[in-house]
């Protein structure tokens, strides 16, 4: 039992599907033990069994709704109760809502803010003392290419991802002289069902032309994290779009985004 407590673990939130699931598998391929956190107990346990069978690593799961304010503390209590040595924290859980700000339900938008920003902030703060015990540790926060400009009809989502990007940059600088490396992932369209959940059914058909596959994004991301990259932007098209956002007038970029994501 004492030997299990000495094992080091990577925690992945939003691990039951999409990029989170693919990142969990990418880590397992590298023989890294996992703590998987998401809402769906059935999907988590299914993934746990698959990974243990295929890769022979230790996997524990916690089914919890991370959009609730108390959840980060409950996750930390779980880690401490089991005496897990966490040396990788991947804050992947998050979602978007599409539509005009005034027309969307306020409660749903505030829950998105809670998950996309507050949960990320809380988990970094609460787990940093555990990560700091390790000689080398990693924090990876998941943002989006939407973080680099305001996006009408994805107003709150793009704002939350801008927060994640800015917070991650600042945290990286604060921890630069420690053993904790901090990176930010900013993917573009990925074939994860995100567009459908956000209500972007019309856009999802167009996005299929540019979609990257989650396994591809995960592999690029994990390599970038271990190489201690500051920002990881998978895909040449996405890199170009991010640089364009930095040099073109904001009004022009926002008009273009409004045209892409326009409502009826």
Image: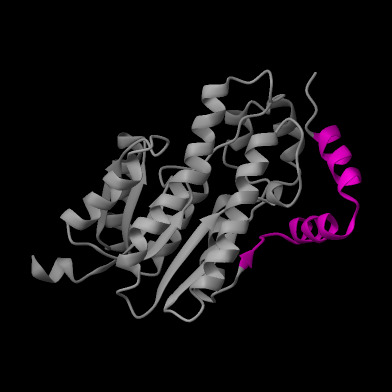
Residue at image position (23%, 69%) is: 7
Residue 206 sits above or below residue 187 on the image: above
Q: Give the range drawn in magenta.
A: 231-260
Find out whether residue 42 is within the magenta segment.
no
Residue at image position (42%, 79%) is: 179
Residue 88 sits above or below residue 19 on the image: below
Q: In this view, does 25 lie to the left or right of 217?
A: left
Q: In which quarter of the image is the C terminus?
A: top right
Residue at image position (88%, 60%) is: 247
Residue 195 x, y percent position in the rendering: 64, 34
Find out whether residue 249 is within the magenta segment.
yes
Give the number of callouts: 0
Residue 227 x, y percent position in the rendering: 54, 76
**Residue 220 can be seen, yes or no:** no
Location of residue 238 (image quadrant): bottom right
Magenta stretch, main secondary structure class: helix
Closest to the observer, 237 or 93: 93
Q: Quadrant of the N terminus?
A: bottom left
Location of residue 258 (image quadrant): top right
Q: Which residue lies furthest to the left in this view?
A: 1
């Amino acid at each position: 039992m004492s030997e299990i407590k000495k094992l080091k673990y990577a925690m992945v939130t939003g691990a039951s599907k999409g990029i989170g699931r693919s990142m969990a598998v990418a880590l397992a391929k590298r023989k890294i033990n996992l703590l998987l956190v998401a809402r769906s107990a059935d999907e988590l346990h299914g993934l746990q069994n698959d990974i243990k069978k295929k890769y022979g690593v230790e996997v524990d799961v916690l089914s919890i709704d991370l959009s609730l304010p108390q959840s980060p503390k409950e996750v930390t209590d779980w880690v401490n109760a089991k005496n897990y040595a966490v040396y990788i924290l991947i804050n992947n859980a998050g979602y978007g809502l599409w539509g005009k700000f005034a027309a969307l339900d306020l409660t749903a938008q505030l829950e998105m803010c809670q998950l996309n920003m507050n949960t990320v902030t809380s988990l970094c703060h609460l787990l940093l003392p555990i990560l700091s015990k390790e000689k080398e540790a990693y924090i990876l926060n998941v943002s989006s290419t939407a973080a680099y400009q305001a996006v009408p009809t994805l107003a709150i989502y793009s704002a939350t991802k801008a927060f994640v990007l800015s917070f991650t940059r600042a945290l990286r600088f604060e921890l630069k002289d420690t053993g904790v490396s901090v990176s930010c992932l900013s993917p573009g369209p990925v074939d994860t069902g995100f567009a459908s959940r956000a209500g972007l059914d019309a856009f999802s058909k167009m996005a299929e032309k540019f979609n990257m596959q989650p396994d591809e994004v995960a592999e690029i991301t994990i390599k970038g994290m271990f190489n201690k990259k500051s920002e990881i932007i998978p895909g040449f098209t996405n890199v170009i779009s991010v640089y364009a956002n930095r040099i073109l007038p904001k009004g022009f970029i926002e008009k273009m985004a409004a045209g892409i994501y326009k409502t009826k």
